[in-house]
Amino acid sequence: MHWINWVIIGVYLAYFVADGVRRARGTTEIEGYFLANRSLPWWAVGLSVMATQLSAVTMIGTTGQGATDGMRFLQFYFGLPLAMVILGVTIVPFLRGARVFTAYEYLEKRFNAPTRSLTAFLFLCSRGMSCGAILAAPAVVFSAVFGWSVPATVTLIGVPTIIYTMIGGVQAVTWADVKQMFLIVFALSAIVIVLLVRIPVSPGGALHIAGAAGRLKTFDFSFNLHETYTFWSGLIGGLFLMLSYFGTDQSQVQRYLSARSVPEARTSLLMSAYWKIPLQAMILMIGILIFVFYVFQRPPLLYNPAHESAVRAAAPADLAALESRYDAALTSRLAAASMVAGTKRHTPASHEAESAFRAAESDVNELRTAALKLAGDVTHEGTRDVNYIIPRFVLTQLPLGMAGIFIAAVMAAAMSSIAAELNSLSTSTVVDFYRRWYRPEETDENLLRVSRIATLVWGIIACVVATYAATLGSLIEVVNRFGSYFYGSILGIFVLAMIPMARAWPAFIAMIAGMSAVAAVSYGAPSISFLWHNVVGALTVVVVGVFLSAIAPDRNRA
Amino acid sequence: MDAGRADRTAGEGGHLNESRSAPDEAAEKAGNPAPFRRTLVLVMLVQVVTLVLLWLLQNQFRPS
């Protein structure tokens, strides 16, 4: 990579650490460290909410998904706007009115200490692990693309994030998120412009090619529980997932608890409702445009450069044979694509050109599958190379400086998510455990010191998990599956908290029942999409909680 | 402030943050639903327009 790109990345990292340290000045109480004295404007909180949710996985994985699978993934977010509206009128005023530091603190007021501690414990386990997974995703890709070791990449992203989060607290995290969000949108917009300039057909022609390959199909109205992304799984399952994530996950709750007032907290959430789907559509569209770009430029047979080198060294003859057939298939595809772009849509000539294009595309995909299998046989690693499509494109096709800006944007996406999670992990550790069970009378000065130590410890845990997650690919899947067991149940417990008749111990038992129901569905019917797990968990908790509260009222209810 | 005491009293209607201003308190209590309803309608409108545009894009460029 050119030295100018390295300078851009270096300046970016140095600026965010310096800014975080600067924002630490004057923070002497934990209210300021954890909640910025509840003084942040809605637009800063709104951008922080969006930056926290948009991780490096989104920047790298979603664009790759757009290139290989098209717009279908957008359905995952269809429940989000409705979730934000529901949260704006329910949980936001609830938590703000309760004057809490963490969402779980409210559960003790409403139910009992065990319920609070269990939910906080589940949050710490899942977020501690997922923080490592979020850090591992770009580290693995960068290490393969640049040839660095994974621990070095983890350190490059993790250490600056730990420093500014530990020193600056939520102020540093939020204002860094705001700037990082602008950087991310700028980098994505610049890539769209570069792609539109470099694709040798008109935007209409490019969309015609993408449409012919089925990449512009967004909606799938089939009610198929085994299909991950359908309109209904996105709208219903996605609604429950988003309600749980934005309403009960401390990494998001802490964002809007730091807003100036209830109306500003609500408005900050509605910002995501406005912009999430258009932003995600833009990210997927970048992937689709990269697909079209590679119809006119020769794409690599294997996008992962480390696998490409390994196969070239271990099986050069097999690779050469595949590459020769691949080149022939690409030539046929290019000829068919030129015909598709040059014909008027919905005419017999267009139908014929599209059929030829799809046949050639199918040949290209078959050869890619064969090459990926060969890579798997040689490396004994996972062969999915979707995550390498955009880094490979950025490094080989973008003009000087743009690659540095994009890599800085991917780091920004990773750092904004990790910083928010470290900050919330520290908050929950200190407020829900250290102060609740160990030192209830601790002074603010000492709590601030413990909070910074907790941030550092969680940061180190995230780096260690990231290093191992990178070598044990399945660990990320384990983390996601583990999280899906109780996301719905945690949402259910908060819904139960809003039902006046719900009692403390029935709620606790209902939460266990919710997690057990999800585990039963997950193992009994593993093909059911994980989005439905949230619905199962939440509904089980509410139904069991209400039923048990009705038949065995808790006399000790506060 | 005694953080431990505040933690406990918060459950009895106490306030963790004793330095909050009166206008902030009033705004929180009021919740001011009218602008929220307006924003709500706008959010729904933006979503419907986005989904219709995506639907048109899908149908305009559907594979033949």
Image: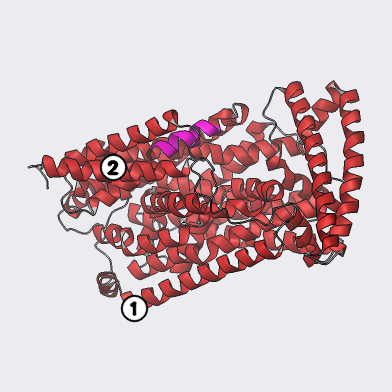
- For this view, does A512 lie left or right of residue A129? left
Can residue A503 be seen? yes
Viewer-side residue, B48 vs A58: B48
Q: Residues within 10 Å of mark 1 (few under 14, many from 20)?
A: few
Q: Which region shows up in magenta?
A: A476-485
Q: Is residue A136 above or below residue A206?
A: above
Q: Main secondary structure of the magenta part?
A: helix
Q: How is the image coloured?
A: secondary structure
Query: Which secondary structure lies at badge 2?
Result: helix
Q: Is residue A480 magenta?
A: yes
Find residue A143 and report its horizontal and vertical position in percent: 70, 36
The reply to the same-chain question for discs 1 and 2 is: no
Viewer-side residue, A17 vs A431: A431
The structure residue drawn at horizontal position 47% and vertical position 40%, both measured from the top left corner, is A530
Q: Which residue is mark 1?
A: B34
Q: Is residue A111 above or below residue A343?
A: above
Find residue A49 and report its horizontal and vertical position in percent: 48, 57
Q: What residue type is disc 1 on? A: Ala
Are discs 1 and 2 less than 8 Å apart at CB? no
Displayed quadrant of residue A379: top right
Quadrant where the N terminus of chain A lies?
A: top right
The structure residue drawn at horizontal position 70% and vertical position 22%, both measured from the top left corner, is A380
Query: Can you tell which mark lies on residue A122?
Result: none
Q: Residues within 10 Å of mark 2 (few under 14, many from 20)?
A: many
The structure residue drawn at horizontal position 28% and vertical position 69%, both measured from the top left corner, is B28
Find residue A187 and report its horizontal and vertical position in percent: 69, 59
Q: Chain of mark 1?
A: B
Q: Which residue is mark 2?
A: A541
- For this view, does A474 lie left or right of residue A107? right
Query: Which secondary structure lies at badge 1?
Result: helix
- For this view, does A521 lie left or right of residue A352? left
Can residue A426 be seen? no
